[in-house]
Image (cartoon, helix red, strand yellow):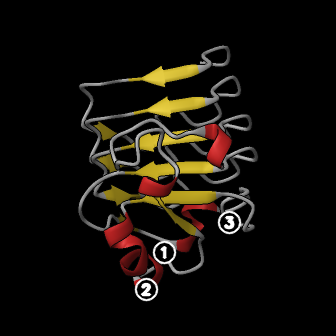
Amino acid sequence: CMTLPTLNLPNVTSIGTYAFNNCQGLTTVNLPSATSIGTYSFQFCGVLTTVNLPSVTSIGTYAFGTCEALTKVILRSGTVATLSSTNAFINTPIASGKGYIYVPRALVDSYKSATNWSTYQFRALEDYTVDGTITGALDESKI
C-alpha cells in the first residue's frame, strides 16, 4: 500500500489491527460501513490528511498515531464513538490542536466530555458541509 493514495472500502465493517499501518502513500480514507477501527490500523500513514468514518462506533489505541498530516476526521454517526485511548491520534495535528474532528452538532458537547475524547477539538459537521447537513461533503472553503 505504499503507493495507494485513497482507500475507499464501502462494504468493510471492521479494520483489523495493523491493517494499513505504515501506508506511506495514503492521503484519504473513506470507510462508510466500518464500525470498528482496530489498534495501530493506520499508524505511521505519514501523508494521511482526511478520514471519513460515517458509521464508526469504536477506535482503537494508536489507530491513527503518527499520521503527521491528519487534520480532518469525520464522524457522522448519531452516537458518540468509543475511543480506547487518548493515544489514538498521538503525534498528529489533531492531537496538537491544529486539526479537527467533525461530528454532528447535537454531539459536539457529548464528545467534548466523553472518555478519552476531551483532549481534541471538535466542529459541527453542519457548519462545514456543502449543503449544511451531516451527510454532505466537507466544503474546504469553510475550513
Q: Circle 1 sits in a helix, a strand or a loop, which is it?
A: loop
Question: How many neighbours does mark 3 have within 10 angstroms: few (below 14), some (14-19), or many (20 or more)?
Answer: many
Q: Amino acid at mark 1?
A: Trp
In the drawing, what numbered circle is on residue 117? 1
Task: Tell me how far mark 1 sits from mark 3, CA to CA.
Answer: 10 Å
Q: Nearer the viewer, residue 123 or 59?
A: 123
Where residue 120 sits, quadrant-wise, is bottom right
Question: How many neighbours does mark 1 have within 10 angstroms: few (below 14), some (14-19), or many (20 or more)?
Answer: many
- Residue depth check, mark 3 versus mark 2: number of the one nearer the observer: 2
Q: Is residue 37 above or below residue 108?
A: above
Q: Position of residue 132 (x, y in %)?
A: 40, 48
Where residue 69 sits, quadrant-wise, is top right
Image position of 77 (left or right of 19): left
Closer to the chain start, of discs 3 and 2, is 3
Q: Is residue 85 above or below residue 39?
A: below
Find the residue positioned furthest to the front: 131
Q: Residue at x 29, y 40 (%)?
A: 34
Q: Are marks 2 and 1 in contact (CB under 8 Å)?
A: yes
Q: Circle 2 sits in a helix, a strand or a loop, which is it?
A: helix
Q: Position of residue 53 (x, y in %)?
A: 39, 44
Q: Nearer the viewer, residue 28 or 43?
A: 28
Find the residue positioned furthest to the top: 3
Q: Residue at x 25, y 36 (%)?
A: 33
Q: Which residue is mark 3?
A: 95
Q: Amino acid at mark 3?
A: Ala
Q: Position of residue 9 (x, y in %)?
A: 35, 24
Q: Residue at x 75, y 47 (%)?
A: 68
Image position of 29 (left or right of 133): right
Q: Amino acid at mark 2?
A: Ser
Q: Position of residue 104 (x, y in %)?
A: 36, 61
Task: Tell me how far mark 3 sits from mark 2, CA to CA.
Answer: 16 Å
In the drawing, what numbered circle is on residue 113? 2
